[in-house]
Amino acid sequence: MKMLFLLTSLISLLLVTACNQMNAEAVVEPTKKSIVEHIEQTKPKKDLPDGFKDYWYEGKAEISSYYLEQARYGEIRKGTAVLIYVTEDFLPKKQVKADNQNTRNIPVLKLNATKNFNTGIYPYAIMQSTFYPVADNQHALKVSSSMQEWCGHVYSQLNNREHFEIVSHSYFENEADTKFTLDKAFLENEIWTKIRISPEELPLGTIEIIPSFEFCRLKHKEIKAYKAKASLQKNDSTTTYILEYPELKRSISITFTTSFPYEIEEWSETFTSGFGNSAKEMTTTATKTKQIKSPYWRKNSNQDEVLRKELGL
């Protein structure tokens, strides 16, 4: 009888403990945000004008080629740059392009920005991808950057979840394999897509902003937010957005048409290039040479190479 009493008491104690744990979890669980819930708790979605829909949802990408003069190792290298803008559906959890339509998908304006130039005998190939919600109500959902040259390759990726989650891989010892989080801040990479949606709401004044992944990797700078001064200069038919980073001794200016669809006409980037006593301030420039609209994903036969000639590539 005594044994039965002890056994009953023990079971009761376990049940009470389990209930307490469940109650504790019940209190904690509602405060946790799922990835989707976190993404949806943003500023109100922006209403897209008919002109935007007509331009960006006709089943084609906008492809613009640029004559590039890239500062690298203290010299100017001639090459090409291409900006490919296209709208697509984006999966909020996996944070990749959606294969199927779903009400949970997030419409984004994607930018694939490429650069190709040579440094002496060996070539550089750089590509940055930005996935920015067309609702213009939060930061870019994802940014990735890859760089290939004969010494090796580098890859960095940012995912916008509860924080900015960043992974980076490099053949350089001090940048080898890293994984960390950052508090959310403006992203230079997202500026290029925000311009195409709502340039009137670009951040101005003294701001905290994460420089482009391309710059951080080329100059071996820590990926983090830096103070910058942001300003706009309006001309007759174009507007120039300028970012100046005092700590990095760098500035970048992006010139776009003042009226929709706010096409990127040219850009320049000034920073220190070279090593030691030969290091000097230099300016990278890119000037638009050609722009077309095309469903490039279907233009993959040999006869479609004529489009590369049209773009000057």
Image (cartoon, rainbow, N blue to C red):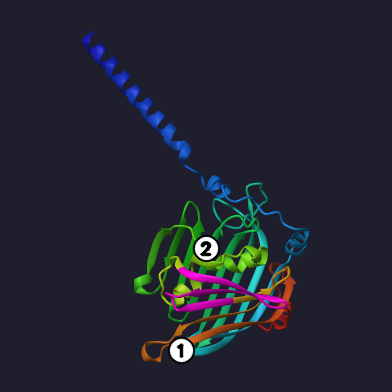
In the rendered structure, find residue 195 and report the number of the disc placed on it. none
Q: Is residue 53 magenta?
A: no
Asked if residue 178 shows in the view, the reply is yes
Q: Which residues are magenta?
A: 227-253
Instruction: Work out whether mark 1 precedes mark 2 in sequence or the reverse, and give the earlier one.
Output: 1
Three-letter code for the amino acid on which mark 2 is drawn: Phe
Cα distance between the residues tagged 1 and 2: 29 Å
> In the picture, residue 19 is in which quadrant?
top left
- Residue bearing the label numbered 2: 186
Whether residue 281 sits left or right of residue 7 in the image: it is right
The residue drawn where x is 57% and y is 51% is 92
The image quadrant where one finds the N terminus is top left
Query: Which residue appears farthest toward the front when viewing the image?
Result: 205
Residue 86 visible here: no
In the foreground, 208 or 187: 208
Side of 40 relative to 166 (left or right): right
Q: Residue sitting at 22 percent across and 13 percent down?
A: 3
Q: Amino acid at mark 1?
A: Gly
Q: Nearer the viewer, residue 4 or 269?
A: 269
Majority SS type along the magenta span: strand
The residue identified by callout 1 is 74
Left or right? Give the position of 27 relative to 68: left
